[in-house]
Image (tube, rainbow, N blue to C red):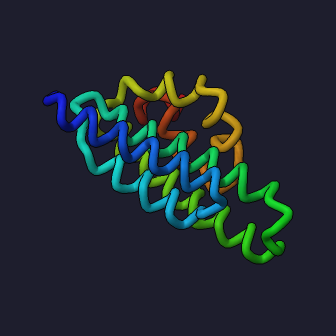
């Protein structure tokens, strides 16, 4: 991967973290999405973006400055995007499944009902899941 792509992905990561620190959750989400668009052959950009969104979702859920409805909205936005990003990462590199399952920031999300389909896909090939 060219160095400029690695640097660009790093800049989006820093931007997302700054936005998160400023409680600008929509901006953090947008920066994470942009980061995921800077492709990598390993699919890691998708997983890294999903982890940033997991952090954002966690921070928003504890943000006392947000009312309940706003926290829920941010959680739904992040959750939906995390599922898409993880699916894209797995589609580009199925070997990421074990890394995703064991990641301490992502594994709690995978136990949630909205991730059950994705969790099934992390279990291996379709033939292995049937048995």
Residue 23 percent across, percent down from the top left = 66, 60
Quadrant containing the N terminus in the rendered view: top left
**Position above or below: 26 against 100:** below
Residue 16 percent across, percent down from the top left = 49, 50
Residue 128 percent across, percent down from the top left = 47, 26
Residue 11 appears in the picture as rendered: yes
Residue 46 percent across, percent down from the top left = 38, 42
The residue closer to the viewer here, 63 or 46, is 63
The residue closer to the viewer here, 18 or 49, is 18
Q: Looking at the image, which residue is at 81% across and 68% down?
A: 65
Quadrant containing the C terminus in the rendered view: top right
Q: Looking at the image, which residue is at 28% across and 28% down?
A: 42
Q: Looking at the image, which residue is at 50% across and 45% down?
A: 50
Q: Quadrant of residue 70?
A: bottom right
The residue closer to the viewer here, 86 or 49, is 49
**Position above or below: 105 against 36:** above
How many discs appear? 0
Q: Residue furthest left?
A: 2
Q: Is residue 122 left or right of residue 114?
A: left
**Position above or below: 26 against 117:** below
């Amino acid at each position: 991967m060219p160095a400029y792509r690695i640097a660009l992905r790093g800049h989006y990561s820093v931007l997302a973290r700054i936005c998160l620190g400023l409680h600008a959750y929509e901006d953090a989400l947008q920066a994470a999405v942009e980061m995921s668009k800077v492709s990598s052959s390993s699919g890691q950009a998708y997983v890294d973006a999903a982890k940033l969104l997991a952090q954002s979702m966690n921070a928003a859920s504890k943000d006392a400055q947000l009312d309940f409805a706003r926290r829920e909205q941010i959680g739904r936005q992040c959750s939906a995007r995390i599922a898409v990003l993880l699916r894209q990462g797995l589609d580009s590199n199925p070997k990421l499944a074990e890394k995703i399952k064991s990641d301490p920031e992502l594994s709690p999300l995978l136990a949630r009902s909205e991730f059950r389909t994705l969790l099934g896909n992390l279990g291996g090939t379709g033939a292995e899941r049937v048995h």
